[in-house]
Structures are given as C-alpha cells and as structure tokens.
Amino acid sequence: MPRLLDDLGRGTLPVDDDAFQQLTGHPWPGNVRELKNTLSCALAFVEQGESLQARHLRFPATAPEQALLDQLPLGGHALDSVEQATIKQTLVMTRGNKIRAARMLGISHSTLYEKLKRYANG
C-alpha cells in the first residue's frame, strides 16, 4: 500500500489501523486498480496533518451487493450447494462464457473448470 500512496503523491501519509484493516479485508474484485481508485478518493477527504482513517474510505461497488447477500436465506445450506447455485446463475448471466463467469466470481478459469467437473461427477 505504501507504493500506491507514493504513486498518488502521498507516500508518507500515515494509515490508521482501522483503515488498514478495512483495506486489507476488502475482497477487491477490481484488483489493484480498484484499490488505487479507492485510495485516490479517500485522499480527497484527508485534511492537512491528518492520517488516512476508516471514515475516509468508501467502498461503493460492494456495499449494495453485500447488503443484498446479507439478506439472502443462506443459513443452514451446504456450502457446496450455495457455490453450485452461484456458479450456475453466473454462467446463465454470462450466457455460458466461462472465462467471464470466472472473472465475475473472482476465481481463475481453471478453478471454475475444476468446480464444474466436480459438480458434474458428484
């Protein structure tokens, strides 16, 4: 993260523990570009002499999705069945495009192929 802050011209900016934990705990579906964009936006809220704090961070891309996921009645279901349903729905959304589906699911296409093979045989 110091490298990204340096790229944004704020390499010496201290980062509070809470902000660091939120940043490292976020899944970052957009990878480094999303992290860099989030840091760039957060820096706009940091006042002179302040450290980067959790209150400066905004995670708009995942907040609505996470709220939706939290409302689904998934408790009590086997993880394999939830995963299988998620993969199936994602493949429908991508019209069978496995590479795009894997990207949306945040896994490699080889992992997706392994899971599909396992579910077909199980």
Image (spheres, grey):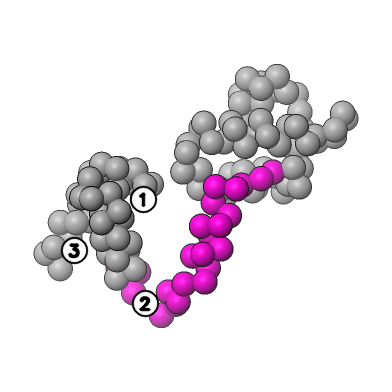
Which residues are drawn in magenta? 57-80
User: For this view, does 112 lie left or right of residue 12?
Assistant: left
Q: CA distance from mark 1 to mark 2?
A: 19 Å
Q: Residue at x 59, y 32 (%)?
A: 37
Q: Which residue is mark 2?
A: 77
Residue labelled with disc 1: 105
Which numbered disc, 3 or 1, marks the residue that appears first in the sequence? Answer: 1
- From the viewer's side, name the closer residue of 56 and 93: 93
Q: Earlier in the sequence, mark 1 or mark 2?
A: 2
Q: Is residue 73 left or right of residue 19?
A: left
Above or below: residue 58 compared with residue 89: above
Cβ atoms at labels 3 and 2 below 8 Å apart = no
> Looking at the image, which residue is at 66% across and 30% down?
40
* Kind of residue at badge 2: His
Please identify the quadrant where the C terminus is shown: bottom left
Callout 1 touching callout 2 (CB < 8 Å): no
* Viewer-side label of 3, 1: 1
